[in-house]
Image (cartoon, rainbow, N blue to C red):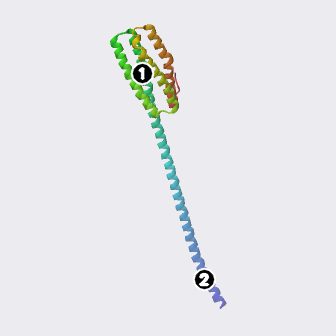
Amino acid sequence: MGGGWAGLVVAVVGVVGTLGAALLTQNRADRTKRLELQAAAEQRREERLHAEALLQAEQAEARRREGLELRRRCYIGLNTASRQFLTAMTNYLHALRHDVDEDVDASLAQLETSRSAYRDSYSEAQMIVPRPVLDASGVAKTRLNTAYGKIKQLGPSLSGRTAELQALEDELHQKVWPYVGEQKGAMRADLGVESAD
């Protein structure tokens, strides 16, 4: 009987070994498949995160470019309006110097139009531009408005008085133009353009 039992034990061990090997192989295959699926899912997650990061970076760059373009247009408008306002004041003083009613009236009308355009440009800038540019623009605005007030107050009484009108014009060039130039410099610096005053 010893040989029969030994054969039976060998047979049972063989069957258990075969079944165990099959189960172990299946278990390892399942584990390998699970690891592959996890790796694929992790790769898709990383790709999705990378794509989202790229999209956010592109959107941030687009917002930065849009903001820069908005400021650039605002700066062009404000710079142009400031210079036209100052030029209109100078032209008004020239018209008063020559004392021709039609020229004085036309220059005064142009001065008021330029002042209004400047005020609109400055109001827009207050909502858009960063603090350093707004500070420089505020100083220029104060200088422009002070000169405008003085010209409106004294201008008509100085009609034809060349020396006084020249002094007022010199004051414009000395006390206003430099601040309009500083405003332009602050705008150019914000845009990353080297200042060329």
Q: Nearer the viewer, residue 173 or 22?
A: 173
Label 1 residue SS: helix
Is residue 137 placed above or below 155 in the rendered structure?
below
- Across and down, in percent, residue 178 comes to 51, 20
Residue at image coords 33%, 13%: 102
Residue that numbered label 1 is attached to: 85
Pointer 2 local density, CA inside 10 Å: few below 14, some 14–19, many at least 20: few
Is residue 57 placed above or below 9 in the rendered structure?
above
Q: Quadrant of residue 75?
A: top left
Q: Nearer the viewer, residue 88 or 70?
A: 88
Amino acid at circle 2? Val
Residue at image coords 59%, 74%: 21
- Across and down, in percent, residue 70 comes to 44, 34
Residue that numbered label 2 is attached to: 12
Label 1 to label 2: alpha-carbon separation: 107 Å
Q: For the N terminus, which image quadrant?
A: bottom right
- Across and down, in percent, residue 6 comes to 65, 86
- Give the number of the mark in front: 1 or 2: 1
Amino acid at circle 1? Phe
Pointer 1 local density, CA inside 10 Å: few below 14, some 14–19, many at least 20: many
Label 2 residue SS: helix
Question: Which of pointers 1 and 2 lies earlier in the amino acid sequence?
Answer: 2
- Across and down, in percent, residue 109 comes to 35, 19
